[in-house]
Amino acid sequence: MRQRHDYEGHIKPPGIMQVKDMDDTDLLLLHLLEENSRVTAGELAVMVEQTPAEVERRIAAMEAAGIVRSYNAVIDWEKAGNGVVSAIIELKVNPERDYGYDRIAERISRFRQVRSLRLITGAYDFQLMVTGKNMQEVARFVSEHIAPMDRIRETATHIIMKTYKDNGNTFFEREGGERIPYSF
């Protein structure tokens, strides 16, 4: 059996996928799973012209490599009657010597209220998506937990009033036959 090596010459364990090992079929599978993670291996196999067993093997390898991190449902909380308030919080941060933004990002990501956290370009350094039961809970979270953290210089909170599209999923329904005005 031929051994595979990584770029530094180390032997790679069999079955562990590396990014450089991915081909067009793997990329297509990722796009299809991102669009609908409930599609079966049999349905995926037809779409990518592989056997169901090969599709399952490829997905398992991408899961093991941490490329596929999780499978999530997209919930319309407004329809569910949950009443959750979401907000985008922008942060200006002083990065740490030798660690940059990573340590502060790790600390912030541990809060259950933080749904997503991104390093961004522009006037602010981080963008957080947070949730709470109401605006007061979101404001309290920011003022008591985020703003006082070391290295946080400034915060800006934007309450989300309505979500129209999230992760490629639209949250509005048109009446049958309703046309959207379109111009060039």
Image: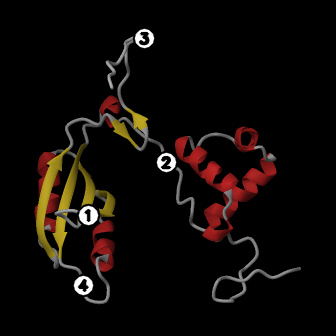
Inspect the image, locate mark 4, and give the three-letter code of the amino acid beneath it.
Glu
Q: Which residue is mark 1?
A: 121
Q: Secondary structure at mark 4?
A: loop
Quadrant of the frame with the N terminus: bottom right
Crowdedness near tag 4: few (<14), some (14–19) or many (≥20) residues, C-alpha within 10 Å: few
Residue 119 occupies quadrant: bottom left
Give the x, y percent position of residue 111: 29, 64
Q: Secondary structure at mark 1?
A: loop
Q: Secondary structure at mark 2?
A: loop
Q: Residue at x 15, y 61 (%)?
A: 142
Whichever of labels 3 and 2 marks the residue nearer the N terminus, that label is 2
Separation of marks 4 and 2 at Cα, in angstroms: 33 Å
- Seen from the viewer's position, the closer of residues 41 and 80 is 41
Give the x, y percent position of residue 156: 12, 57
Residue 72, numbered circle: 2
Q: Residue at x 25, y 65 (%)?
A: 126
- Seen from the viewer's position, the closer of residues 150 and 165 is 165
Residue 146 occupies quadrant: bottom left
Separation of marks 3 and 2 at Cα, in angstroms: 29 Å
Q: Which residue is mark 4?
A: 96
Decide if residue 50 is on the left or right side of residue 66.
right
